[in-house]
Amino acid sequence: MYELKVRASKTYGITIAENLSLFTERVLPLITGASVAIITDDKVSALYGGALDGFFTAKRVIKIVIRHGEKSKNAANYLKIINALAENGFTREDTVIALGGGVIGDIAGFAASTYMRGITLIQVPTTLLAAVDSSVGGKTAIDLNAGKNLCGTFYQPSAVYINTGFLKTLPVKEIKNGLGEVIKYAFLSDTVRKEDIGDINAALIYKCLKIKRDIVEKDEKESGCRALLNLGHTVGHAIERLSGYKLSHGACVAKGMVYAVEVSKRIYGLSDETVSNMYALLKSGKHDLSCGYSAESIARQLAADKKRYGDRVNFIAVKDIGKAEIVKIKISDLKTMMEDYESSFKSV
Ligand code: ADP
Ligand code: ZN
């Protein structure tokens, strides 16, 4: 069992255990009202919909189930959730539990943060991606027609409870999705090592979240160093959009990491040894690291990115494993470096 404390605008605990045996001790004291809403998706509901019931025999429990998948992270389901809370007489004392992956964590978090200007939120992630990343740090969101995560808040949960037992039913694709983020952490800090990556367990999740916790505590609202967590994401998001979201987020982050390495190699003149260590790490998640999109099309996506600053973007570069930094780089320079990388594999 592992525990972490996050000292952000709210101080809260993260528990990482192999079962739910600590749920009573760590989470129940935070649930003071009479009503609890468990928000989940249809797949998670079929597997674990009843897993928390035994803890709430003295409470009124309602369950709100939405269809699985990113398409469900929409305004209609958000309204469905907050209307259900209202119709069931939820007050500011009551609690929302997000039981599911990143989609559920984001939409339930957004609902909890806005219903009556904010009610207690407990995150119980059931995917590796949500466990190592999205359940911690307080980002909540829904998607709009114009793009993903365009509407959201910063709202910290009151607790995060990770039961690694829930992860046993994840299909390989979902494990790889989470591993995209795990590899990102392995580049941000040398505490997550290549050898750790094959084995999805509480210790690995703890190491990843410790890195995220340390960054979020310094910069909760992403005005500075929190951008380091976007390592692999600048290009990764571009690839995700180019694929029409057919590729998973983590799969795109892994591909984006290749560009992080290749661009860093060109910015810093990294040694062959450093680059080969970086590739060994990249390969440890068994991702398909080929891209399939041209430097030109990626650069076009970056130029349309809302996060750009004029003709520049924040690019997270790596001097070495464990040494990442934020570089404001011209999209045109990035494009030249990506083209140089492109021509290097075209010529072999
Ligand atoms: P993510 O966490 O990757 O952002 P989702 O919330 O969409 O994304 O979850 C990915 C998929 O995995 C969904 O179809 C969801 O129903 C399913 N899922 C979530 N948790 C589990 C689990 N523990 N076992 C099996 N499938 C799960
Ligand atoms: Zn991510």
Image (spheres, rainbow, N blue to C red):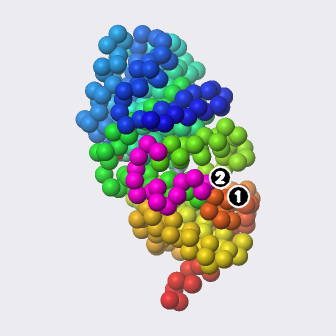
| Extent of the magenta region | 189-203
Of the pair 157 and 242, the residue shown nearer to us: 157
Give the structural element (helix, strand or loop) at label 1.
strand
Residue 205 is left or right of residue 263, and the answer is left
- At label 2, the amino acid type is Leu
> What residue is shown at x 31% (from left), y 37% (from top)?
44
Residue 3 is left or right of residue 318, and the answer is left
> What residue is shown at x 64% (from left), y 42% (from top)?
214
Q: Quadrant of residue 237?
A: bottom right
Placement of 158 over or under 17, stated as above or below: above
Reading the chain from its start, which is encountered first: label 1 or label 2? Answer: 2
Placement of 171 over or under 265, stated as above or below: above
Residue 327 is left or right of residue 127, and the answer is right
Q: Name the quadrant of the N terminus.
A: top left
Placement of 331 over or under 89, stated as above or below: below
Give the residue pinned by disc 2.
228
Note whether ligand 2 is within 8 Å of mark 1. no
Q: Residues within 10 Å of mark 2 (few under 14, many from 20)?
A: many
- At label 1, the amino acid type is Glu
Q: Quadrant of residue 340?
A: bottom right
Q: Position of residue 346 (x, y in %)?
A: 51, 86
Report, in whole angstroms, how far the alpha carbon at label 1 lies from the one at label 2. 7 Å
> What residue is shown at x 35% (from left), y 16% (from top)?
56
